[in-house]
Structures are given as C-alpha cells and as structure tokens.
Amino acid sequence: MLREAASRFPDEYWPNHAAARLQADRSDPQGALRTWYALAERFPDQPSATAALKTAVAAAERSAGATAPGNRSSDTNAEGLAVRLFRRSRRPNGRIS
C-alpha cells in the first residue's frame, strides 16, 4: 500500500518517505544507503531525509568496517559516497548538483 501511495503521489514527500523507510528496513546497510540517498536527492530540502541518510551512512560504515578493508571497492565504500554527497553544491533552485 505504501508503494502504491508513493507511485500515485510521486511529488509528495511523506508517502515516499514511508515507502523508503519500509524498503530501507528490509535492506542490508548498503541497500538502505541507496534508498535514503535516492530520497534525499529527490527531496533535498527535507531535513528528515537528510537525517535518515546520515544514519544510513553511519550504519553502512560500521558494516563495511566489519569486513576486510581490502575487499571493498571505491564504488561500495560508504564513506566515499557520503563525502561525494555532502560535498556537492546546491544549484540556485535548491537541487543538489
């Protein structure tokens, strides 16, 4: 039902947030990170999306720290993703560039 609401109202934040929370809760840390990243990109002015993304980054970093460092690629490195995301500049329309 949440996914249906999010698809019926793609520009409304809260149905999409609820669907993202459900998807993130059912994912591994990297999957949750991708879910919250996508939501934060779609709704850059929503503090709760940013907060959820930061929490997901921390969880992914803890999870990645449990694996051998030599086994991670730069594409799946949560810290690298966080740095790229939070260093992006915002365009005048509020969107992340």
Image (spheres, rainbow, N blue to C red):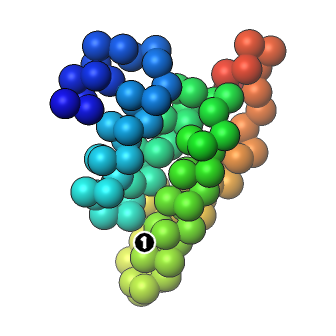
Q: Residue at x 80, y 15 (%)?
A: 92
For label 1, count other residues whose C-alpha is less than 10 Å away and answer few (under 14), some (14-19) or many (20+): few
Quarter of the C terminus within the rendering: top right
- Quarter occupied by residue 82: bottom right
Quarter of the N terminus within the rendering: top left
Looking at the image, which is closer to me, 5 or 63?
Answer: 5
Residue 70 showing in the rendered view: no
Q: Residue at x 33, y 37 (%)?
A: 19
Q: Is residue 4 left or right of residue 25?
A: left
Figure disc tally: 1
Q: Position of residue 80 (x, y in %)?
A: 59, 59
Q: Residue at x 44, y 36 (%)?
A: 17
Location of residue 95 with respect to 53 vertically, above or below: above
Looking at the image, which is closer to me, 76 or 22?
Answer: 22
Q: Residue at x 47, y 67 (%)?
A: 60
Q: Name the element at disc 1.
A: loop
Q: Position of residue 25 (x, y in %)?
A: 32, 57
Residue 91 showing in the rendered view: yes
Q: Amino acid type of disc 1?
A: Arg
- Quarter occupied by residue 85: top right
Q: Position of residue 72 (x, y in %)?
A: 42, 71
Residue that label 1 marks: 72
Q: Position of residue 37 (x, y in %)?
A: 50, 43
